[in-house]
Amino acid sequence: MAPPVLELYVCMTPNTLKAMFMLGELDLPFEVKHVRVYRGEQFAEGFDRLHPYRKLPVLVDAQGPEGAPFTVFESGAILVYLAEKYGKLLGKGAAERSTVMQWLMLQMSSVGPSFGNASHFTAASGQSETYSRRRFVTQAARLCALYDERLSAERYLAGDAFSIADVATFPWLWRHPGMVRIDTSRFDGLNRWLREVEQRPGLTRAQARYKTLVEADRADLTAIDPDLMDRIMGRGRWWLADESGGGQ
Ligand SMILES: N[C@@H](CCC(=O)N[C@@H](CS)C(=O)NCC(=O)O)C(=O)O
């Protein structure tokens, strides 16, 4: 059997689930390349050729544009690349396509960072940072209310058709509000959308493989070297003394 044309470099993160969900929606075979971030594999020599900022997910398409291998980093860019290549979930016509992009950009610029930081300061930082936690949980809660309003008025984020904006947003609004203790029980529009998207076969196709890597990453986390955790978080001896940038 020919090897899959697509390789997806992954770790446990909603950003990875987005890409796996998309590949599930397209029902495409792909090889999972699990980068053990809690063992520091993203810092290995050469990994920056896959992602210059050494993050996951990354997609490698052996048959990219002009038939040559092509690498895509950033989960939003991966969704757009796949949607364009396979002609799906991108919206039809200029207005619908722009609406898809607007909701995709809002996810990338606001939903991911707000929930990422809210989770960090709720559970992962190991510090008691009331200001930081409250700031990001407030942003995340405002976003939940905004998405509830949108999804009370529209079936999907960009209107009548399911799109990559939904694929990008679902993994963040699914479990993360509960993880940062935001009560979304009154958000009927948001909850209706979550239940509907949850039933999609594309998500089901992604879930078993995603669960396997979550289990492995959770096990790595229990045994992580504290200095590696500081490096991932950019703190401790990895804090920049003069905030000048540089180094990895
Ligand atoms: N904006 C990026 C976020 C990528 C990102 O931050 N990935 C994290 C997992 S959420 C990662 O690779 N962490 C390992 C590290 O920072 O060393 C995307 O959407 O792809």
Image (cartoon, rainbow, N blue to C red):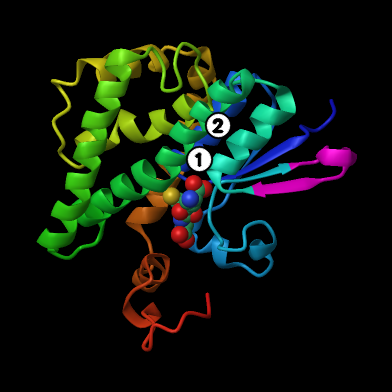
**For the point 69% across and 66% down, which residue is it?**
46
Q: Residues within 10 Å of mark 1 (few under 14, many from 20)?
A: many
Q: What residue type is labelled 1?
A: Thr
Q: Does residue 206 appear left or right of residue 108 in this picture?
A: right
Mark 2 sits near ligand 1, with its Cβ under 8 Å away: no
Q: What residue type is labelled 2?
A: Met
Mark 1 sits near ligand 1, with its Cβ under 8 Å away: yes
Please determine whether, in this image, residue 152 is positioned above or below residue 70: above
Query: Is 65 within the magenta?
Result: yes
To which residue does mark 1 refer?
A: 16
Q: Distance between the residues labelled 1 and 2?
A: 6 Å
Name the secondary structure under disc 2: helix
**For the point 88% across and 38% down, which residue is it?**
67
To which residue does mark 2 refer?
A: 20
Mark on residue 47?
none
Residue 181 falls in image quadrant: top left
Magenta residues span 61-72
- Give how far across and how far down residue 87 sits, in percent: 70, 22
**For the point 26% across and 30% down, which residue is it?**
146
Answer yes or no: is residue 212 visible: no
Q: Which quadrant, please, contains the N terminus?
A: top right
- Give how far across and how far down residue 86 sits, in percent: 72, 24
Give the camera-side residue of 143 and 46: 143
Residue 141 falls in image quadrant: top left
Residue 43 falls in image quadrant: bottom right
